[in-house]
Image: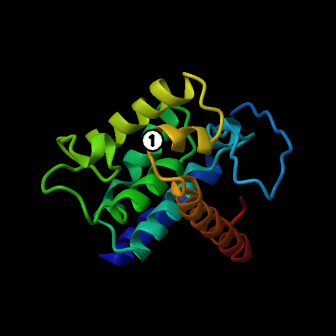
Amino acid sequence: MKTKIFLIILSLILLSYIIRIPVSAQKSAGDSANIEIAISSLTKKEDEVNYSLKKKSIYDLLEKYNSPLKDSVDDFIQVCQKYNLDCYLLPAISCLESTCGKFILPNSYNPFGWGGGRIMCDNWADCINRVGKGLRENYIDKGSQTLSDIGRIYSESETWTPRVQYFINQMESLEEKNQLYFSNNQVEL
C-alpha cells in the first residue's frame, strides 16, 4: 500500500513538472530572525507553485506523526488554492491543535480546535474547507497581516504562533529535502 501511495505521489510530482501553473509573484524581503510571518507568506504567490511537491511534503509530515489526516492531503491542497493560503498553514494548525488530527472530540472531524474543538464537521474535507474559508474571510480579509495577528485571535496562548511556525518549518524542510532528492535523481524541477 505504501509503495502504491509513493508511486502515485511520484507520478503526480513528475506530472507537475510537465504541467506548470503560472502565478504572478510579488517578492519582498524581511527580517529572517523575526517570527512575524507576513500575509504575503501566508498567501504565497510564487512564479511557479509546485503543489505536488507541497503535497508530498505535507504527506511526509502527516505520515511522520501517523496522522489520520494523511489521506486528506488533496483537501489541504485544494483549500489552500481555493482561498489563496499557504499550503502549510492548515496542516500546521491541525498538528498543533490535535497532534495532527489524532486527538479530537469523537466524530467531530475537527483537528483545528475550531470553536474550542466543539464544532462538529461531516468529515475531514468539510472541516478543512470551513477553517480555510474562516481564516481567509474572518482573519486575513479583515486585516490580519502576520501569523501572530492570526494567533492572537485564534488562540489565547502566547506560544501558539511559534508552535504553528514549528510545523510550517518542518514542512518547508521536507520540501527542500524532497526537491533536492528529485533534482539529484535527474528529475527536472
Quarter where residue 147 is shown: top right
Q: Tell me which residue sits at (13%, 57%) in the image.
A: 106
Q: Tell me which residue sits at (56%, 29%) in the image.
A: 140
Quarter where residue 166 is shown: bottom right
Q: Position of residue 17 (x, y in %)?
A: 64, 53
Q: Amino acid at mark 1?
A: Tyr
Left or right of residue 54, residue 67 in this image: left
Residue 28 or residue 8, whichever sits in front: 28
Residue 158 or residue 175, whichever sits in front: 158
Left or right of residue 41, residue 58 in this image: left
Q: Tell me which residue sits at (38%, 57%) in the image.
A: 97
Left or right of residue 95, residue 167 in this image: right
Above or below: residue 99 compared with residue 35? below
> Where is the C terminus found, in terms of image quarters?
bottom right
Residue ID for mark 1: 154
Residue 189 or residue 95, whichever sits in front: 95
Q: Tell me which residue sits at (73%, 76%) in the image.
A: 184
